[in-house]
Image (spheres, grey):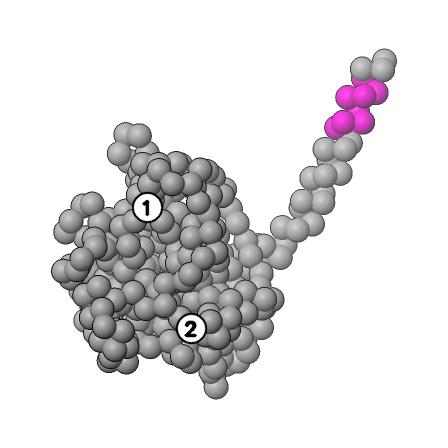
């Protein structure tokens, strides 16, 4: 009898707990649904996201190996995300202003982490798992708006460096398109060793700061200004790794305090990259509503927020 009573109590506790969890689901469902329904579809097609040339990589010589990705939009302009092949990873942050943000809806970002499994297959992985020396990963980013992308990296919250934009890639430009997936690093690198972040033997907390904004960030150079900043530093374009000044970095990190809704799904973990994702990444087109949803979706609560800052923290043991 005691056993039955105890079992019933446990069952009731579990059911009660499930209601608590379910109470949180509606907001997550709304966030994820709002993000996914803005993808291209028969009745909702973001401009310029239905076709495009095949993406190409552009390896630039330098003193240290780099991993690059070059998303291409339908007009043929290439954009890229560059990051060191050092087993370390990146994070997000930003500051900017926009006059039409309120008319464009809240800025959102979906991201999924991909990992090479022991058999060499590329599968989705949980961003919160532990990573070890030799693990190969890349991250796929999907913004819900046209605008600009910035990627910064820190190790153990140390000195930040900007991985993208990069003066060597597309003249330092960093424009992006709604729902076009951007890989960091790119799976289309001609040098296979540059297609992955590979963790080294030194444990650390690797942080990626990803910024999506509708207007360029104040105080963060891009294009010709980035090339000029690199030349002024004395390191030149080929070896330049721009570091934001303390005041600029503080503004970028302040973006993390904005009110954001987040939805995380375990669905799809361990599954390979879908054909939809491969085609979209290859041709530089928007993911449609039939493509798998990102593992994590983050969206500003307010449509007046001109940027979205996302911090991806990777536990490197």
Position of residue 168 measured from the top left corner of the image (x, y, whole percent): 20, 68
The residue depicted at 42 percent of the width and 80 percent of the height is 218
Tell me the residue at 32%/62% (across/down).
163
| Image quarter of residue 49 | bottom left
| Relative height, residue 245 to residue 15 (above, below) | below
Is residue 268 visible to the viewer in this orientation of the structure?
Answer: no
Distance (Cα) linking label 1 and label 2: 25 Å
Along the polypeptide, which appears first: circle 1 or circle 2? 1
Q: Is residue 32 left or right of residue 178?
A: right
Question: Which residue is painted at 42% across and 57% down in the image?
Answer: 154
What residue is shown with label 2?
245
Q: Tell me where residue 138 appears, x and y as whole percent.
A: 33, 48
Q: Is residue 308 above or below residue 137?
A: below
Q: Which residues are magenta?
A: 4-11
What residue did someone put label 1 on? Answer: 87
Residue at position x 72%, y 45% from top? 20
Camera-near label (1 vs 2) is 2
């Amino acid at each position: 009898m005691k056993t039955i009573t105890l079992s019933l109590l446990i069952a009731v506790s579990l059911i009660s707990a499930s209601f608590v969890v379910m109470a949180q689901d509606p907001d997550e469902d709304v966030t994820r649904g709002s993000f996914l329904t803005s993808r291209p579809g028969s009745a909702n097609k973001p401009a310029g996201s239905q076709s495009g040339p095949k993406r190409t990589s552009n390896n630039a010589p330098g003193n240290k190996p780099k991993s690059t990705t070059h998303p291409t939009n339908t007009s043929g302009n290439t954009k890229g995300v560059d990051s060191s092949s050092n087993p370390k990873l990146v994070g997000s942050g930003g500051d900017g202003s926009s006059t039409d943000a309120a008319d464009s809806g809240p800025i959102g970002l979906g991201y999924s982490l991909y990992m090479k499994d022991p058999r060499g297959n590329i599968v989705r992985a949980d961003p919160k798992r532990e990573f070890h020396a030799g693990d190969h990963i890349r991250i796929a980013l999907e913004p819900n708006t046209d605008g600009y992308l910035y990627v910064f990296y820190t190790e153990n919250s140390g000195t930040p460096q900007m991985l993208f934009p990069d003066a060597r890639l597309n003249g330092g430009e960093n424009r992006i398109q709604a729902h076009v997936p951007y890989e960091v690093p790119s799976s289309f690198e001609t040098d296979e060793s540059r297609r992955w972040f590979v963790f080294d033997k030194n444990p650390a907390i690797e942080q990626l700061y990803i910024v999506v904004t509708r207007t360029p960030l104040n105080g963060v150079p891009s294009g010709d200004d980035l090339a000029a900043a690199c030349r002024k530093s004395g390191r030149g374009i080929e070896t330049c790794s721009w570091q934001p000044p303390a005041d600029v970095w503080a503004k970028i990190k302040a973006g993390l305090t904005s009110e954001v809704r987040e939805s995380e799904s375990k669905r799809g973990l361990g599954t390979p990259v879908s054909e939809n994702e491969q085609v979209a990444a290859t041709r530089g087109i928007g993911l449609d509503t039939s493509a798998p949803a990102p593992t994590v979706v983050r969206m500003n609560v307010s449509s007046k927020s001109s940027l979205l800052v996302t911090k991806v923290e990777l536990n490197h043991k």
